Image: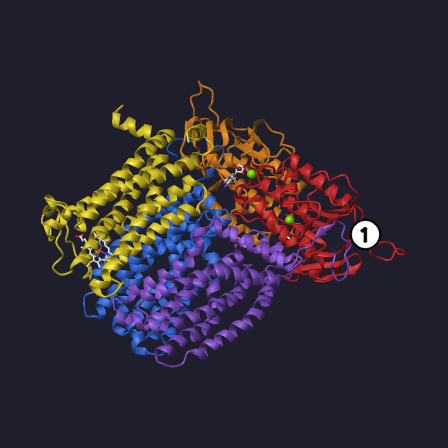
Chain colours: A blue, B purple, C yellow, D red, E orange
Amino acid sequence: MNDTARPVRMAVAGQPPSMPGAARALLVRDLRLLWRRRGDAFQPALFALIVVVLFALALGNEPELQARVAAGVLWVAALLAGLLALDTLFRGDAEDGSLEQWMLAPVPLAWLVAVRTGIHWATTSLPLLLATPFLAELLHLPRAQLPVLLAGLALGTPLLSLIGAVIAALTVGMRRSGILVGLLALPLYVPVLVFGAGSVAASAQGLDPVGALLLLGAGLAVALVVAPLTAAAAIRISTS
Amino acid sequence: MNDTARPVRMAVAGQPPSMPGAARALLVRDLRLLWRRRGDAFQPALFALIVVVLFALALGNEPELQARVAAGVLWVAALLAGLLALDTLFRGDAEDGSLEQWMLAPVPLAWLVAVRTGIHWATTSLPLLLATPFLAELLHLPRAQLPVLLAGLALGTPLLSLIGAVIAALTVGMRRSGILVGLLALPLYVPVLVFGAGSVAASAQGLDPVGALLLLGAGLAVALVVAPLTAAAAIRISTS
Amino acid sequence: MNPLVRWFHQLGSPPYFDRFAARWAPWSFGAGALVMAIGVAWALNLLAALPGVGAWFFVPSDYQQGDSFRILYIHVPAAWMSMFIFGLMAVYAAIALVWRIKLCEILAMACAPIGAAFTVITLATGSIWGKPMWGTWWEWDPRLTTELILLFLYLGVIGLYQAIDDRRNAARAAGLLAIVGVALLPVIRYSVVWWNSLHQGQTIRMFGQSSMDPSMFPPLIAMVIGTKFWFIGSLLLRARADNLDREAGKEWVRERAAAQEATP
Amino acid sequence: MAASGQPIAMTDPAHPTPPLLAARDLCFSRNDLPVFGPVDLSVDAGEALLIRGDNGAGKTTLLRVLAGLLRPESGRIEIDGHPTNTPERTRALAYLGHLPALKADLGALENLDFLCGLHGRRASQTPESAMRIVGLDGYQDALARQLSAGQKKRLSLARMWLSPAPVWLLDEPYANLDLDGIQLVNRMVQAHLREGGAALVTTHGAYAAPPVRTRELVLERAA
Amino acid sequence: MAASGQPIAMTDPAHPTPPLLAARDLCFSRNDLPVFGPVDLSVDAGEALLIRGDNGAGKTTLLRVLAGLLRPESGRIEIDGHPTNTPERTRALAYLGHLPALKADLGALENLDFLCGLHGRRASQTPESAMRIVGLDGYQDALARQLSAGQKKRLSLARMWLSPAPVWLLDEPYANLDLDGIQLVNRMVQAHLREGGAALVTTHGAYAAPPVRTRELVLERAA
Ligand code: HEM
Ligand SMILES: Nc1ncnc2c1ncn2[C@@H]1O[C@H](COP(=O)(O)OP(=O)(O)OP(=O)(O)O)[C@@H](O)[C@H]1O
Ligand SMILES: Nc1ncnc2c1ncn2[C@@H]1O[C@H](COP(=O)(O)OP(=O)(O)OP(=O)(O)O)[C@@H](O)[C@H]1O
Ligand SMILES: [Mg+2]
Ligand SMILES: [Mg+2]
């Protein structure tokens, strides 16, 4: 059972945790918490819905105008919803001391961060993704643009979550990070938005949207590797 | 000094607090805190700026389209910035136990809530109001519509703050209210948005915007009286 | 030990750095001010009035833009500095994170406000220039937008540095953000290439074929050099202040303060 | 210490003075499960009431009900023999709970200033003198976030010391304090009672109670 | 209790066993002000180290540095005589801090389940058995938010009991506990040491230490 590289005199016979085991424990925990607060799962999608409605109201009843801005509004709504949900990524765990225990666990912190970010994406952004066709309909988005919009969001929202994880980690030590998170995250979100909204705009003009989507995919691949490591480093810095 | 209606045997000679005294103490405290974190004062305005940037980017570089949606975008930005700042209204005080002491102070809780909301408006929405002409310029808002927009925001943002105070009070007992605040607040914000954005739209079409502005003013007058009392009751309920 | 490495180690000691900065900051400022003054005078054809050699210093008006192009001599150096400083800040931050050299933390954080100031200057001069050229102060053009985002990043670094209580942790956290933000620099640089843009494309090349009139070059070079010196001066000054602030209460600071009072 | 050393009796001298604070038949439930059963208690000026009970017995809950932070299910709370509602009790009670009520970004003295503005203060004390008394001299300008657990507790004690309210509700005042701090609490309670105040103190019974006239209430876990 | 009652010595029997945990010349500063000066300490299997010190002396900070939550300014920390970095120490150390590391919305047992997944667990124990040992039988399904201060502390103790790490770092384990709880801590520490573990315990010295082989370290406020 004692399988450290340099043997530690383990006084107590025990089972050290494995990386998949820790990930499973985290998954079970988060799903239980989600089930306890079932309503919360739909909140980001609801928030996006409200932003869309606010916009529709603020623009007045002009379907043609709405159709032109629809893709942009949906991207911004997704982005803002992700931003608001960011605070729940690590903060709860920091405040009740769980994060300390993560740092002291014999599994790499970056691995826990990656798993947590994945779960967080699946529970906040995925519902939003599923609601997108409905929201698009509300804003009279032309049907032909919907697949591009969905593809962009499917690649873009995990990227946003990963970038957001770094920012959330940087601010987790602060009592009230408030709006600072937004200030730090949004500039980094901008490229994602530009390529995401750009792909829809390209397809609206009859151009090929694949280039922009490929760039999003490349960004996602890089972030999948780099972001958890950076976020783990950031957590260690900002909680000390 | 002992001036309760029904005299309490005050064992200790002391100075009970007065309502203006408590308000002054709160004001001094909040200004000190703001000064400690000077940067935070500009955050709502910066957030609004970022929302504007996001929108401008998402809509692509089409000045004419931007001008048409400018007023709506600015209202939504102000509203979202106010929403994000809402969490700082009572939550900090709830988490460190200050709110308990507010409830136990010999001055009415509603008074403290009113003062706190006023300070909060002045430190979060006022900078945004001052930044509006600049933001409007960025979105190519026609100059003629600017005074109407400003008047609407000047009446509308305090109203949003007061409504927000009630929502913040209702959710203050919760650990992580997160996005829930947004869900509760936004439906109540909608009428303000409709009249606010509506007034600009009216003036854009050459109609008289005064009616919508008067309605906002009336709403503000009512909220000034009702909201602090409601928020105080909500705090008592949600912290027990 | 390699003398360069030894010098670097020496520089890392707070009292030594304080002396170094106190000594060289005024010189840098002086050199910067002088070179920039020459550059501005040259650019505005003030030097052309010099008797005899005046013709050497003449900068012609642009055939399209007239005299309004002369704002270029502020705009372009400031724009380059805004990006250069961000990169330098990230380099300092990376050194600070890996080798935990305190001086590098201080230097990285001292870069941020200066870089932000250059970014503001770029945006302001660009806007002023844009009004006659494009008929509008602001346009959601890729280069303009990315430069604005660079400003946000600077503000984010500064905000994060101030929001964290412990200075070393604050510097490390903000430094990490700076490193992450470096990804933006190539986007700014190549935005005019990747997207079709209102903004002027790559016209100036320090090396190789440039599409600018050769006589327009020398003042630009003077401004580029001048801003570098000016930057070094303010970097030393800011870093010195931060260094003193962190070391306040240490023996050598008290000694130096006492010495300062003794010789007013 | 306050000038008026003697309690001022406001009741008819023919009758015995009613207790400063009393509760009759006090019950509290959460989700219809009783947390503590009917409780009767009373403390008079110059007395301390020690509330003992195991972990989870309901001590914290009882103090919060008395303070007015929670609403009792039934029963009534009297001050000077008069049933009172929550706002009326605020003048008579000062509460020290688990949370320190300190703003992390304000200095120690600034925190006390604010709390005095909110609750009033004893005529004879200033925030400065209170900080000296609790042994935080030299920490006036330290930010609350930089204080250790025990230092925060001491600052909260300074707040109690400044409050003009005669009845102190202290929830585990000894937790996190060193031996010196424990003696400090005892001395402060003693001085407060000598001036005609009263104190309710919850404890697990692990500490020596202060040498004052003391009543005791033992809470047992309901159900 | 664990099956392997005897510590397994991994070092050359010719030389004396190095201590389980040792620190040499450990320093920590905040904003360039020293919090504690150079500290040397060592604990061996079967020993407890009592870290005493006044409020603000730096006890919490020292434990956090040892645990690896804070980075020492200088000095080194050794496990079994080998200098270690933070990740290497995680297998050897279990930390009980001021924060309970409990999710308010999970049941007591669910909380333990998660923490076992994260830290591993002793072969001989299950979350159920640990809850019985700390006296929380019957609270398995109670949500953590509904537990009183002392009950939360007991649940955290159950987590320590489940951890397979040989060295316990306990920051004020006695705070908020009733007399019964204090004895519980002492019994748990004793049993852990008997199995070859070690424990570092901070305290203000107000409590009786457990009857085990004990070293002592007194921290004094720096500057
Ligand atoms: C707010 C508006 C503007 C901003 C934010 C801005 C930003 C920048 C930046 C960041 C650079 C450096 C690019 C690099 O070296 O890769 C640059 C260079 C330059 N800008 Fe602007 N600019 C603005 C407006 C203008 C206007 C109106 C003009 C004139 C029509 C102009 C002309 C130039 C020129 C000629 C260069 C040098 C190009 C080169 O690198 O070869 N800019 N600007
Ligand atoms: N917010 C809550 N929701 C539901 N139940 C609660 C809540 N807070 C406390 N309880 C329960 O009420 C009971 C009394 O709790 P209380 O905090 O008053 O105990 P206590 O005597 O102060 O204990 P301790 O000595 O551990 O602080 C406990 O059984 C606890 O589980
Ligand atoms: N986050 C912080 N920032 C700055 N200073 C701090 C911080 N936390 C603690 N300190 C200071 O460091 C010193 C040591 O604090 P620490 O919490 O380690 O003390 P302690 O011995 O655990 O005290 P206690 O017995 O009161 O818990 C104290 O003087 C405190 O004021
Ligand atoms: Mg309690
Ligand atoms: Mg401590």
Q: Which percent across, then down, holds residue B131?
A: 39, 62
Left of C50 or right of it: where is A240? right
**Quadrant occupied by the C terminus of chain C:** top left
Give the class, few, some or many, for how many residues have Cα within 10 Å of label 1's Cα (few <14, many ≥20): few
Give the residue at x 46% y 60%.
B124
Q: Which residue in the structure is indicated by mark 1?
A: D8
Q: Is residue A20 visible?
A: no
Residue A4 locus on image (x, y percent): 39, 34
Residue A144 percent coordinates (x, y): 25, 72
Residue C27 percent across, percent down from the top left:
28, 35
Image quadrant containing the N terminus of chain C: top left
Q: Amino acid at mark 1?
A: Ile
Left or right of residue A91: residue D37: right
Q: Quadrant of residue E84?
A: top left
Q: How many numbered circles does the render carry?
A: 1
Q: Is residue B13 left or right of residue C221?
A: right
Element marked by disc 1:
loop
Residue at the limit of the structure toward the right, as seen here: D14
Q: What residue do we see at 74% from left, 60% from top?
A: B4
Question: Along the line of sight, which residue is nearer the eye, B32 or A17?
Answer: B32
In the image, is residue A55 above or below residue D116? below
Q: Tell which residue pokes out farthest to the bottom in this image.
A: B207
Observer-nearest of B91 and D42? B91
Residue C17 visible in this rendered orientation of the protein: yes
Give whichever of C191, D148 is nearer the camera: C191
Q: Residue furthest front?
A: C51
Vertically, is B224 above or below E97?
below
In this rendering, position of residue E165 left or right of residue B147? right
What chain letter is assigned to the residue under label 1?
A: D
Residue A96 lies, with reference to residue B83, above or below; the image says above
Q: Quadrant of residue B69?
A: bottom left
Q: Is mark 1 within 8 Å of ligand 4?
A: no
